[in-house]
Amino acid sequence: MSAYLVLIGLVVLERLAELTVARRNLAWARSRGGIEYGRRHYPWIVVAHAALLAAAPAEVWLLGRPFVPLLGWPMLAVAVLAQGLRWWCIGTLGRQWNTRVVVVPDMPLVRGGPYRWLRHPNYVAVVAEGLALPLVHTAWLTALCFTAANAVLLTVRIRVENAALSGRRAPAGEP
């Protein structure tokens, strides 16, 4: 369990680094006329991700979930690869990357890095991590609940992001 807590702690530190980059990039985007979309769903994304990081170790501890090497090691590899993909996305987007949906007028769409093959590669990383991180230590309830909540949130998020990137108004009352 202590090694799992270290892993979760490292992911928390990674999230804090992401938020630091996102705040800096948000200030840069706003200084160039960046427009934010999807403000209403963003707090729910924050809640879901915080819940994932709290619920996974809580489930392991409270329900006595064992570490099963045949599941845990491959899931650790998936979680690490998801982090690599996430930071590849961040590096590729540079100042245009954010945890929020912010569009800077007249900035071209990025088509390099993982964006050559996927429109939303960061969300592939989010889905992979949301499944893998809890399953490193067999926290299957957390993996299931986060995946279900994340599916709903990503449906909204991708719709908002696609509309924002194409210059259309965001759907369903999203600003």
Image (spheres, grey):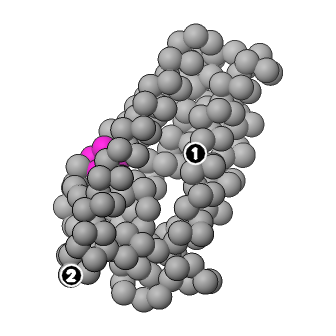
Which structural element holds mark 2? loop
- Residue 97's place in the image compared with 160, above or below, is above
Left of 168 or right of it: where is 3? right
Which structural element holds mark 1? helix
The quarter of the picture where residue 78 lies is top left
Look at label 2 and name its amino acid: Asp
Left of 151 or right of it: where is 19? left
- Other residues around mark 1 within 10 Å, as few (<14) / some (14–19) / many (≥20): some
Residue identified by numbered label 2: 106
- The main secondary structure of the magenta stretch is helix
The x, y position of residue 51, in whole percent, is 65, 41
**Highlighted range, magenta:** 86-90
- Other residues around mark 2 within 10 Å, as few (<14) / some (14–19) / many (≥20): few
The x, y position of residue 84, in whole percent, is 33, 39
Residue at x 42%, y 72% (from the top left corner): 36
Look at label 1 and name its amino acid: His
Residue at x 73%, y 18% (from the top left corner): 61
Residue identified by numbered label 1: 49
- Name which of mark 1 and mark 2 comes first in the sequence: 1
- Residue 167's place in the image compared with 174, above or below, is below
Left of 71 or right of it: where is 161? left
In the rendered image, is residue 5 in sight?
yes
**Which residue, as the protein is rendered here, is positioned at the far top?**
2
In the rendered image, is residue 89 in sight?
no
Judge whether residue 88 is colored magenta: yes
**Which residue, as the protein is rendered here, is positioned at the far bottom?**
168
Q: What distance separates the C-alpha of mark 1 from that of mark 2?
A: 31 Å
Residue at x 62%, y 12% (from the top left corner): 1
- Residue 69 shows which numbered tag? none
